[in-house]
Image: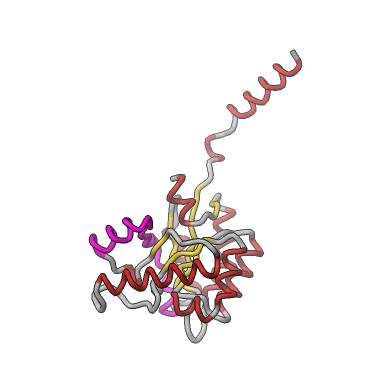
C-alpha cells in the first residue's frame, strides 16, 4: 500500500510540472580550427560553464594540431567536417569537395576513432547535388541560423547583440575558433553563455539538436 502511495505521489509531482519548465535549446558551433591559441581559450570557457558545442574542423588544421581535436573530442564536444583546405564550392567542383571531405573524415577518424556525421561547407555554399552526395555518405549538411560575423572582426558588443536579438529555441549559432590575428569570440562566450543560461537555454551539440527537435 505504501509503495502504491509513493508511486501515486511521484506521478502527481510529474503531472504538476509547469509547462514553462520546458527547456529551450541552442547549439554553439565553431568553424575553421583548430587554432593554436583561440581553440584552447574557447575550450576553457566551455569547460568553465559545462557547455557542449560542435567544432567544424578544417583537415589541414586538424593535421597540424591533432592534440586540440583530441581535446575537443575528449571534452564531449562534437567534431564536424569542414573540408580539408576550405575551398568553396564554385571555385572548385563537386568531385574536389568530395575528395576533401573524405580526406578530412580520415584525419578526424585517425585522431578520435570516430567518423564525423556532420558536414558544413565553406561559406555555406552547397548545392542539391553535393548535399545528396554527402547524404549518401550517411552525413548531414549543416549550415546555421545566426551568423555572429566574428570572422570579420565584428566588435564584441555587436556579436553579443546579434545573438541576443536573434536567438530562439533551435538556433544554430556560427562562431569561429580560427580567426587571425585576434579574436573577440572567447570574450563573447563569457558574456553570452551566462545570458543564455539565465534565459532558460540549454546547450547541446548539433547532432543532439537535430535528433530530438
Ligand atoms: Zn569556414
| Residue 154 % position (x, y) | 44, 76
Classify 49 as above or below 99.
above
- Residue at figure coordinates x 63%, y 24% from the top left: 11
Classify 60 as above or below 139.
below
Residue furthest to the right in view is 2
On the question of residue 158 being in view, the answer is no
Span colored in magenta: 127-153
Residue 138: say if magenta: yes
Q: Nearer the viewer, residue 83 or 3?
A: 83
Residue 1: say if magenta: no
- Residue at figure coordinates x 35%, y 68% from the top left: 121
Classify 155 as above or below 77.
below
- Residue at figure coordinates x 27%, y 63% from the top left: 130
The way the protein has been coloured in the rendering is secondary structure
| Residue 112 % position (x, y) | 55, 65
| Residue 6 % position (x, y) | 72, 21
Q: Quadrant of residue 31?
A: bottom left
Residue furthest to the top in view is 1
Q: Is residue 158 left or right of residue 76?
A: left
Amino acid at each position: 500500500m505504501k509503495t502504491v502511495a509513493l508511486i501515486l505521489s511521484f506521478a502527481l509531482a510529474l503531472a504538476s510540472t509547469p509547462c514553462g519548465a520546458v527547456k529551450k535549446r541552442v547549439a554553439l558551433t565553431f568553424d575553421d580550427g583548430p587554432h593554436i591559441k583561440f581553440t584552447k581559450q574557447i575550450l576553457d570557457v566551455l569547460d568553465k560553464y559545462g557547455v557542449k558545442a560542435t567544432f567544424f574542423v578544417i583537415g589541414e588544421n586538424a593535421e597540424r594540431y591533432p592534440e586540440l581535436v583530441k581535446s575537443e573530442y575528449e571534452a564531449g564536444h562534437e567534431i564536424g567536417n569542414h573540408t580539408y583546405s576550405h575551398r568553396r564550392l564554385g571555385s572548385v567542383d563537386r568531385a574536389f569537395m568530395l575528395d576533401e571531405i573524405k580526406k578530412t573524415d580520415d584525419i578526424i577518424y585517425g585522431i578520435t576513432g570516430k567518423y564525423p556525421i556532420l558536414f558544413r561547407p565553406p561559406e555555406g555554399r552547397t548545392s542539391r547535388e553535393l548535399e545528396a552526395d554527402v547524404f549518401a555518405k550517411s552525413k548531414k549538411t549543416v549550415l546555421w541560423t545566426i551568423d555572429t560575423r566574428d570572422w570579420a572582426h565584428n566588435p564584441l558588443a555587436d556579436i553579443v547583440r546579434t545573438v541576443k536579438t536573434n536567438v530562439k529555441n533551435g538556433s544554430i549559432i556560427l562562431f569561429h575558433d580560427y580567426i587571425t590575428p585576434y579574436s573577440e569570440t572567447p570574450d563573447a562566450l563569457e558574456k553570452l553563455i551566462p545570458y543564455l543560461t539565465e534565459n532558460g537555454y540549454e546547450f547541446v551539440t548539433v547532432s543532439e539538436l537535430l535528433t530530438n527537435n
